[in-house]
Amino acid sequence: METAPYNPTEIEAAAQKFWDDSKSFAAIENDEREKFYCLSMFPYPSGRLHMGHVRNYTIGDVVSRYQRMLGRNVMQPMGWDAFGLPAEGAALKHGLPPAQWTRENIDYMRVQLKQLGFAYDWDRELATCDQDYYRWEQWFFTRLFEKGLAYKKAAVVNWDPVDQTVLANEQVIDGKGWRSGAVVERREIPQWFLRITDYADELLAGLDDLDWPEPVKIMQRNWIGRSEGLEVDFDVAGSEQTLRIYTTRPDTLLGVSYMAVAAEHPLAMEAAEGNPELQKFLEECQHSAVSEAVVETMEKKGMALGINAVHPVTGDKVPVWAANFVLMGYGTGAVMAVPAHDQRDYEFAHEYGLPVRQVIEPAGNEVCDLNSEAFVIKGRLINSGKYDGLSSAEAFNALATDLEADGKGDRRTNYRLRDWLISRQRYWGTPIPIINTADGQQKTLADEDLPVVLPEDVALDGAGSPLKNMPEFLETADSATGEKAQRETDTFDTFMESSWYYARFCCPDATNTMLDERSNYWLPVDLYIGGIEHAILHLLYARFYHKLLRDQGLVDTDEPFKRLLTQGMVLKDGAKMSKSLGNTVDPEELINKYGADTVRLFTMFAAPPEQSLEWSDEGVKGAFRFIRRLWDCVQIHISGEFSGKKKDLNGLDDRQQELRRLVHDTIAKVGDDVGRRYTFNTAIAATMELVNAVNRYKTNNSVDYQLIHEALESVVLLLAPIIPHVCHSLWRQLGHEEAVIDVAWPIADEAARVSSRVTLVVQVNGKLRARIEVAADASKDAAKEVALNDENVQRFIAGNEIQKVIVVPGKLVNVVV
């Protein structure tokens, strides 16, 4: 029978026009329905969508459409993380202002997103480079400055010599800039910071209540790095100075054999004044990164200062060294070194011939071999005078008590977390709303003077930010005094913009306030979707920023994202897709060839969302073939002999009951897979099995026809969140005026799931010999009779005496011979 061919171009255009005309995805606040805010991390407008985008946004769209079918009031917005260095690089390459390049890319990528049929409320669209957006970021910064939560200070920072800007520690990967790949240098530059450390305990405690993947929570806990320890003072011999160090292992204090200080430490700088060799070494240290993670992996180097510290317990002299693994921005810029019980100190001591003194021995079966490595496990003290025999925990308290009594130490809680460096020496970003007055003061701008507008019609020359050379931007006046002043030329780190965009989506048209009451209706985000690579940077900053918003009275909740789903990468030939490897796949080409539904189906079927997806051209073709098979199945059905004849599904025979049971088992499974487990691949597999069963089922009468109709309706509803365009068309063809987007998610009929027959395992002397089918309500005697008459069972009991037959109803029959 000839059927209408599957034409994705026409089908998808028609569905998208219907959604647009009907404003199907416009979210309305204060609806009587339960709200569901689903958000995928918004993209940087690089110019073209890649398959990683497609996968991320398809996951969010499937969940959003499913939640809508459950009757919830769903908001799924989209916007653009539009500031950043790549725009400056592209501007130099193409001779365009970054603003023009960015907005042209946004226009192109918006079309691509719409081609994929994502259910976005486009009326909420925002771009972080728009004045209406960053105006409120500037306004909020002025409040943080007034509270003392924003401040400027000279700091040793990571300097990227290629991108000509400062990098946060998290943006230094293996000693190189995260974007440019250039070797990072240390420089001391005045920088702006936010006091994220003031919120360290709350950020740590809040992780316990989040429905987030445990690896993400572990990464944040480790980054915050809360530790209990002791600050200890070592006097400097022949000086009034002291070296204060922090240690979490005061039990090893008697094993200190040298001290190490940062290259920028005052003791090191003083010692280098008459020592050219030392001066050269300190300068070399300036070219290494200030990231703790990088320092841990690089070669450890040092030089003696010719200065001794005095041990606070023994009074012994301890040599002081300058070392490249000590960072001035961490703690006090000085550490005590215990080579026997710290691997880094051990390696350094062996390199420079320094003593290794064991003061901890195993308390159990641990092995201590100081000829090969440090013994870093806590144990029992030895070679420690009156502290000998104490456990590490006992020694912690004993030494803390004694040092506090002598005025040489204090118990202290420390954090690995450092205040967030938010300023960048680049052009394409939000201007920091500060003016510098002639008398050296830093002042925020009055609300009426905001926003500080970033000039967009600029020509870049690659020599740093043009703002410093633009009098029309730089020169201004203090509105309070009328005196001349200069604007701050640094711009915000782009993580500032991405730390609150989720809240602005709730009220993007608010003109008189940063956030209004609508934000409290929608927040927190119910499901947030993005890559695990954002575990520390974006997700930690957003949690912090949300608490700042709360404390300003702008939101009521403590956390921005209730549940987090981290999707895996898209791979091809075992490697992450990238232009440099030449293994990218253009989504637009696939859409033009197979349709958006095929692309969506493949990305959801190829792997569970949290795992990496291996690209397969054959897999894409297979997805297309399945949609076409479903299409053809519906065409054949609606033009069949019994079409239009309605029958009640009562009094079904075994064959009919079996199909109906499969339909409702599939509804139950897919609902659980999509709604709770987010295992979309198994949901699709189950639906494919149902379609195969429908294709195998022979329609003999109007009851059969009605069964097939119910099955196909169920398939269309179950797949509507995943392949919405073709389901929009098929639902209408199955006889419904209401659009499938407005239809409720199907509910499994539990009565239909009860099978009239069950399969029993038959064992002979405990070994599987057969499987039999009996009526679900069959008696033990009936089950016994069927089992003993089974042909295969007969082979194993022939010629033997049957001692007993054990029947477990609904499960098995065991014959003992």
Image (cartoon, rainbow, N blue to C red):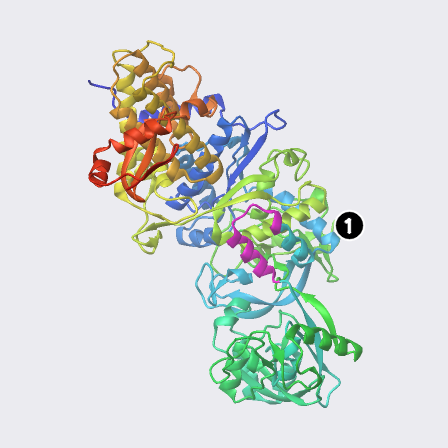
Residue closest to the eye, 768 or 69: 768
The residue identified by callout 1 is: 480
Residue 51 image position (x, y, % from top left):
37, 44
The boundaries of the magenta stretch are: 207-225
The quarter holding residue 355 reads bottom right
Frontmost residue, 391 versus 119: 391
SS at mark 1 in the image: loop
> What residue do we see at 76% from left, 78% from top?
402
Q: Is residue 119 above or below residue 482?
A: above
Q: Is residue 648 left or right of residue 410?
A: left
Please determine whether, in this image, residue 472 is positioned above or below residue 644. Answer: below
Q: Position of residue 643 (x, y in %)?
A: 30, 12
* Type of the residue with mark 1: Ala
Closest to the observer, 205 or 596:
205
Spot occupied by residue 668 in the image (x, y as percentages of width and height): 43, 30
Principal SS element in the magenta part? helix
Inspect the magenta stretch and tell me whether residue 44 lies in it: no
The magenta stretch spans residue 224: yes
- Is residue 328 something one can see in this rendering? yes
Give above or below for 707 relative to 74. above
Asked whether residue 720 appears in the rendered view, the answer is no
Q: Give left or right: position of 322 versus 673.
A: right
Is 638 on the left-hand or right-hand side of 165? left
Quadrant, the N terminus: top left
Q: Residue at x 59, y 26 (%)?
A: 33
